[in-house]
Amino acid sequence: MMRNSFTRITNKRQLVSFHNKAVVLNLIYWSKNGISRTQLYEKTDIRPTTISRLTSELLSEGLIRICGYAQSTGGRRQELLSINRKAGYVIGIDIGAAEIVGLTSDLKAGIIQKIVQPTSSKGKQAILSQVENIVTALSKEISNIIGLGIVTVGLLDTRKGVLRLAANINGWVDVSLKVWAEEKFDLPVFIEGSVKAMALCEKWYGAARNAEDFILVNIGAGVGCSVISGGKIHRGVSETAGEIGHIFIKEDTPLCRCGHRGCLETLISGPAIARTARDSLSKGIPSSICPEGKNPDEVTAKDVAEAAHRGDKLATEIFEKAGQYLGYGLTTLINLINPEMIIIGGGVSKAGRLLLEPVEKTVQQCALQIPRNAVQIRLSSFGDLQGALGATTLVLKELLKIPQLPAM
Ligand SMILES: [Zn+2]
């Protein structure tokens, strides 16, 4: 009995100690130019002797380092502590409909190496082999990889780490991604949806650093969004929340891959923009969208964006219209969710101001005044690496939660 009580108290103390260590590590991790022990004491309710012990532990573990000294105020010079970004490395993999992006980063998103490959169209095993090859190549010559984050398009069961279905990748159905990767690589593995990972990237490293309520909209081969509410990802009861691509915009659109007509995705996705351009070209509308020597039937959204940046009238009109439709979609989100920020990412967002201006104009005209005045709409600045960088934060989140597992 005595023994049990004693064990319980010891464990509770251990838990408090690990909690305190995580608090200290987080403050050090997020400090811009280092933080002193006095500042750590001022920002927490942890006793100075405990802070001293915890920082010594973290220093001896190599997880933090002394990065400089605080200005002397008459007393002893104060050491400034920062994360040792080279204490470990993280691999992030983003499985998209068109490409698989893999990267190795240090503990502060410093990218060491990246690999981009077209996603195989030969089904599940071929894609898994690709992921295996990429992870193997990225971990070559790096000994201290602390974890692997894999994100993918499609519908997931994140609790089980299973991809249920990705409609736009051939054969990418029912994949026990977490179990497979843990067996293959002998690393802690974390799984998430690509668009949610893009939002995590913005929350950790981007424009949404201080935002608790924001939305990341991805416009690429498909259209989806991730809603962060109160600092947390909103998943919904079946983890399908965020399907903004399938909200109704207008009648008479082409048939959507969901089986319905009227979906936003059929109007603004990369394939939709390319299709609109091809239809207009086939009607003989003069334009420089189609590069010389290229078959007009093979024009892509990228061709349209490039032509629009050159001032091509048809291309500019296509993005104006797409921006307007997106504006209708975002108006629904703004009225419904009342976010402080909406960030637009994905391949189509590379159109930049050409897309953003009609979006802002439409939202200005259509959204309710109070939520409209509260929201800032902007473009993502991370490009194609956004999902893979978001994948690395899945591992870092665990690292900052508990520096090492309690010995219970
Ligand atoms: Zn649809």
Image (cartoon, rainbow, N blue to C red):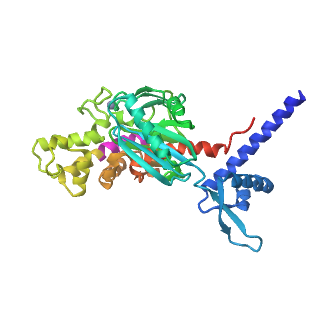
| Quadrant into which the C terminus falls | top right
Which residue extends farthest front?
141
Residue at the extreme left of the image, as rendered: 284
For residue 336, above or below residue 173: below
Instruction: Name above or below for residue 306 compared with residue 134.
Output: below
Q: Is residue 98 left or right of residue 15?
A: left
Position of residue 388 measured from the top left corner of the image (x, y, whole percent): 45, 45
Task: Give whichever of 158, 138 is nearer the camera.
Answer: 138
In which quadrant is the N terminus drawn?
top right
In the image, residue 109 lies at what x, y percent? 51, 52
Report if residue 238 is visible in the image: yes
Where residue 7 sits in the image (x, y, percent)?
Answer: 83, 33
| Residue beneath the point at 46% across and 30% down | 156
Dominant secondary structure (helix, strand or loop) of the stretch shown in magenta: helix
Q: Residue at x 53, y 50 (%)?
A: 204
Q: Residue furthest bottom?
A: 74
* Residue 68 position in % (x across, y down): 65, 67
Image quadrant where residue 6 sits: top right
Please say whether residue 136 is one of the residues in the magenta stretch.
Answer: no
Extent of the magenta region: 323-333
**Would you say residue 329 sits in the magenta stretch?**
yes
Which residue is nearer to you in this view: 314 or 181?
181
Whether residue 344 is visible to the viewer of this picture, yes or no, is no
Task: Tell me what residue is drawn at x 30 percent, y 47 percent.
Answer: 323
